[in-house]
Image: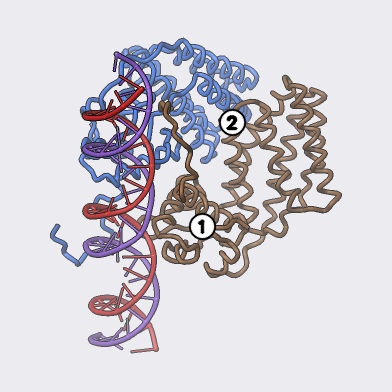
Chain colours: A blue, B brown, C purple, D red
Amino acid sequence: MAQAHKKTKTRPLKGDVAMDRAVYDAIRRAMLMGRLLPGTKLREPALARVLKVSRERVRKALHRLVHEGWLEAVPNRGTFMPVLTIEEVREIYDIRTMLETAIVQRLCAEHSAPAALRLKAHVSEERQAVRADDRGRLFGLSGEFHILLAELCGNEQLSMLLRGLLTRSTMHFSLSAPERFHNCAGPHDHADIVRAILARDAKKAAKLMLDHLLGLVEWQSAWRPPPDPVALEEAFRGISAKRQA
Amino acid sequence: MAQAHKKTKTRPLKGDVAMDRAVYDAIRRAMLMGRLLPGTKLREPALARVLKVSRERVRKALHRLVHEGWLEAVPNRGTFMPVLTIEEVREIYDIRTMLETAIVQRLCAEHSAPAALRLKAHVSEERQAVRADDRGRLFGLSGEFHILLAELCGNEQLSMLLRGLLTRSTMHFSLSAPERFHNCAGPHDHADIVRAILARDAKKAAKLMLDHLLGLVEWQSAWRPPPDPVALEEAFRGISAKRQA
DNA sequence: TGGCAGAATAATGTGCACATTATGATTTCA
DNA sequence: TGAAATCATAATGTGCACATTATTCTGCCA
């Protein structure tokens, strides 16, 4: 590239960290879309060729995904899609139960007026999505509801932690049956929980959240084995590191 | 997990992953020992020279530490020791409160006979360490107590999660005043909590745990600014990547 | 035919060299 | 003298080549 060595100052970072994120996001997107089945080996040269980036970029992204618990690495063997046991999913939901029942109890004890408004607004949005039968949007909102509760506690670390737990628990969905995703009974439960919080009924709110999460894990346990494996090139069809569709 | 049906022989892996862990541990040890003050820049060439490994090894270890939240990285600037706000410490203790009160409540509801024995044994060990005035051992046991409670729940994910939270909350200790480390009122509180669990008094156990954690964060809030900065070579005096003293 | 040993191939791991960027020192001009 | 601009140095980021290790293929032999 022709470099004009008079780089004034804060350049938007020509492509370094942005490209890293792009590769990371591309792989994660393929995972969330359920295109990569459990046990699939993620070969670095193939990924580099498909995503049209250098192998080192792929390597860094894979390392990060491994550190964050999305993938599993075996030294000198490669990086693989994890095979989530239903037991592990239960454990994650167990942790979520501990945290989220505490969260709603705290919100019952103290929540500001704008917090109440945000809760109402969210329930309203979910209801609207249900009426419009926009299942993709509803799925997104269902997840964000739990994040919202954490954020309203004003604990930044808690929000981040719960965000990770949430994605890890929903990953099992995408791995098993992404098409059955959307028809969960989320909206009704969410509305009930918000009603209890606004009424400051801590005991009821905690019970509702407990039942909600138990229902989710129950529903998720009704699970069927994945179909036949898919080639890596097909898995990344339409997914690029450059353009985010 | 991938199918490893043909396992020829497990070679001790001449130095690859073992060396990686060694470098990682060396840096982490220096951090926990309080040799590296908040804001200190961890230069890759200097670390490589001190630890007598290649720069790439240092690089990988630093990346991992950043991903795990131990260090903070600024692109093209370097890797730095984090400056933990007292507010962040409070947030972490807040999460721990949510989880650990739930944990002791669950243990009150159901715990096996061997679980009870392990709890008693741990309290006994702590008492013994107090009598022997072995402060290093007492500090280790104090942390392990909380891990033990999580492990007795039988939730592997929960154990790992709490382990991370614990180390992150104690890191603030090491950063501020490592020598004041050991005289916390842990043992007495721990014994009380175990007694409540064995009596299956869930309400009391939760209250005791809450007070215990509140006491810790209170004690930790009485904080004094760190002394003068230290050179990187001095920080790693006696710490090597090859031999763990 | 079935299994096993060895070679060929492909993938992972790592050190090195170089480009890019930040930091500190020095000079120059008002 | 002071401040800004420029140059020099050091650190970070990245692609590449090669070594090591795993996997697959092929031929051999019982």
- Amino acid of disc 1: Met
Q: Residue at x 20, y 40 (%)?
A: A52
Q: Which residue matches tag 1?
A: B81
Q: Position of residue D12 (x, y in %)?
A: 36, 59
Question: Which quarter of the picture shows residue A94?
Answer: top right
**Is residue B222 in sight in this rendering?**
yes
Q: Residue at x 47, y 42 (%)?
A: B11
Q: Residue furthest right?
A: B131
Q: Is residue B75 above or below residue B144?
A: below
Q: Residue at x 43, y 27 (%)?
A: B1
Q: Which residue matches tag 2?
A: B158
In the rendered view of the protein, which quadrant contains the C terminus of chain A? Answer: top left
Foreground pick, B211 / B109: B109
- Amino acid of disc 2: Leu
Is disc 2 placed on a helix, strand or loop? helix
Q: Residue furthest left?
A: A2
- Which chain hosts label 2? B
Q: Position of residue A47 (x, y in %)?
A: 26, 36
